[in-house]
Amino acid sequence: MISADPPQVYSAGTFDLKAYLKERQALVEAALEASIPVAYPEKIYDAMRYSLMAGGKRLRPILCLATCELMGGTVEMAMPTACALEMIHTMSLIHDDLPAMDNDDYRRGKPTNHKVYGEDIAILAGDGLLAYAFEYVVEQTKNVPAEYLLKIVARLGHAVAATGLVGGQVVDLECEGQPNIGLETLHFIHSHKTGALLEASVVSGALLTGANESDVARLSRYAANIGLAFQIVDDILDITSTRDVLGKTVGKDVAAQKMTYPRLWGLEKSRQEAERLVAEAKAELAVYGAAAVPLQAIADYITSRSH
Amino acid sequence: MISADPPQVYSAGTFDLKAYLKERQALVEAALEASIPVAYPEKIYDAMRYSLMAGGKRLRPILCLATCELMGGTVEMAMPTACALEMIHTMSLIHDDLPAMDNDDYRRGKPTNHKVYGEDIAILAGDGLLAYAFEYVVEQTKNVPAEYLLKIVARLGHAVAATGLVGGQVVDLECEGQPNIGLETLHFIHSHKTGALLEASVVSGALLTGANESDVARLSRYAANIGLAFQIVDDILDITSTRDVLGKTVGKDVAAQKMTYPRLWGLEKSRQEAERLVAEAKAELAVYGAAAVPLQAIADYITSRSH
């Protein structure tokens, strides 16, 4: 394990998640801002930056930083991986929004990438972000052994490829207009489309410190639980929220006859299930004591959020 | 440097390039065939395999293997990187062929990926291949130090991102219907769209052996020269060949009012320039003696090929 500073001490009673997220978001925004300098041909850099800097909760980078710290690492050593995760996430959003896919006009309250730059550039902006993410994590990470970094590269690739979010998106597309798919298929979609990269965010934070297999497995279970809870809450918000609050088109799942958790279970049972998953996620981390307070608070935040 | 066997001894007079390429192509085909086992959801694996196994010269993998051997390495240690290069190349072909990009119906004599699987799956097949390429090179490479592998990951990312083939494709798209772009822009397009990955193919073969900077720079110049020559010959063939020989639509450059080398220089000067570049590429490798014969013969092959 590599650590310059001892893990920060938190207390569940006094921990201010809002302030914590705000501080971390600002760190991530600054790092992302610096991560892609504009060069010739400017249009592609502009397109990549347009979606990368379009706001969002920066949940994946923050999870990576928090897990790295929990395992005795530093924000500094995790920041390049955190940025790479957000680049990959942004790639998946740009490609998912394309007319040939989900055909979305708005994302985070702004026109989607292809609405601004055209479909061709949007496809290339996604490709560019994905490829650059791997270069970036390798070139920018300091004070982490090469063996650990290779594990992170492999994990990121696995989380994006057909074994991860690409596979999830394929099944999601196949199931469009099929309102009667079962729970197993619905779980497959979300554990891959959303869950795989959330898990990689948490696990890569741990791998940066050379965490052992048992810690990685525990953190992986935490991530799988909050990933599923996150999706259930997303489904609920698509029904109960408005475009102004959510910053994207709402009611799309119903319109597209998509299977969702509320459709399968009803709103009330969906809420209960999300809460159960979050409680389990938090319990996984009890073994780390007060050091796990931020990750536990993030788990709580997922079920309480309104957008 | 890591080497089990001494470099093979070749002789320029007796070297049989045709037999060499045939043998290497067979090795690469077998490795590619085994590289992507089909799993659920089958459709995306089928789509990735459809384009990956659609033939082609396998020039990038063969360059990688040959350079690794030249620098004292083995085919075995280079094969995962060789496969990753072909996965990345295939991704770029699938995405370039999309209706929003070059809108091609045929590739290597077969319907393009999106004609068979639909645009959505074609986009995802490209994304999946790109992400998997990074996982594959890390997971499958044996007996290469982690530091060397990280350099390869970074180099591959750089060759694909906006600094590489994505940037080249953007400028290519911008220049469509502009028949009067200058030589500098034309060079930018091809040194990025085609050249960057060819260079990465050669350089990564050297990096696997821990080659020093001066060797890497020399091999990089060799690759840049054959990359440009390759493109000039491609432009010439688009004018002089037929679909049956080429396996793809011909005359597209003229129809699309694309600037090409023959358009800029005429056919005769284009042929001369390609030959000059190849001669320079071969001269770069003279320092390695007979061990460089395969790479030199590949350089010759580029100007003599008819498809």
Image: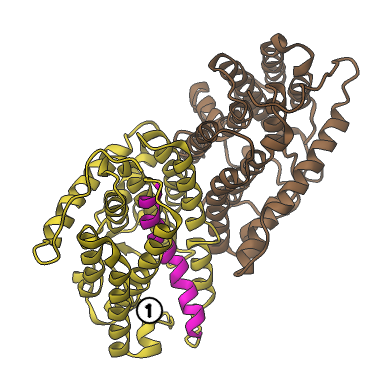
Chain colours: A brown, B yellow
Magenta extent: B181-207
Quadrant of residue A2 within the rendered picture: top right
Residue B42 in the image, given as x and y percentages of width and height? 36, 36
Q: Does the magenta portion include A30?
A: no
Residue B244 in the image, given as x and y percentages of width and height? 19, 70
Q: Residue at x 36, y 65 (%)?
A: B223
Residue behind mark 1: B253
Q: Is residue A131 left or right of residue A261?
A: left
Task: Please state which amino acid type lies under the numbered disc 1.
Answer: Asp
Q: Is residue B168 above or below residue A298?
A: below
Q: Nearer the viewer, residue B298 or A288?
A: B298
Residue B98 in the image, given as x and y percentages of width and height? 44, 61
- What chain is tagged by disc 1? B
Q: Residue at x 72, y 46 (%)?
A: A248
Q: Nearer the viewer, residue A77 or B37?
A: A77
Q: Nearer the viewer, residue B225 or B88?
A: B225
Q: Nearer the viewer, residue B159 or A257?
A: B159
Residue B232 in the image, given as x and y percentages of width and height? 34, 77
Q: Residue at x 75, y 19 (%)?
A: A296
How many residues crowd mark 1 within 10 Å: few (<14), some (14–19), many (20+)? some
Q: Quadrant of the C terminus of chain B?
A: bottom left
Q: Is residue A228 above or below residue A87?
A: above
Q: Is residue A248 left or right of residue B201?
A: right
Q: Residue at x 66, y 39 (%)?
A: A82
Of helix, strand and loop, which mostly describes the magenta segment? helix
Residue at the outermost right position: A14
Q: Quadrant of the N terminus of chain B?
A: top left
State the SS at label 1.
Answer: helix
Q: Is residue B47 above or below residue A158?
A: below
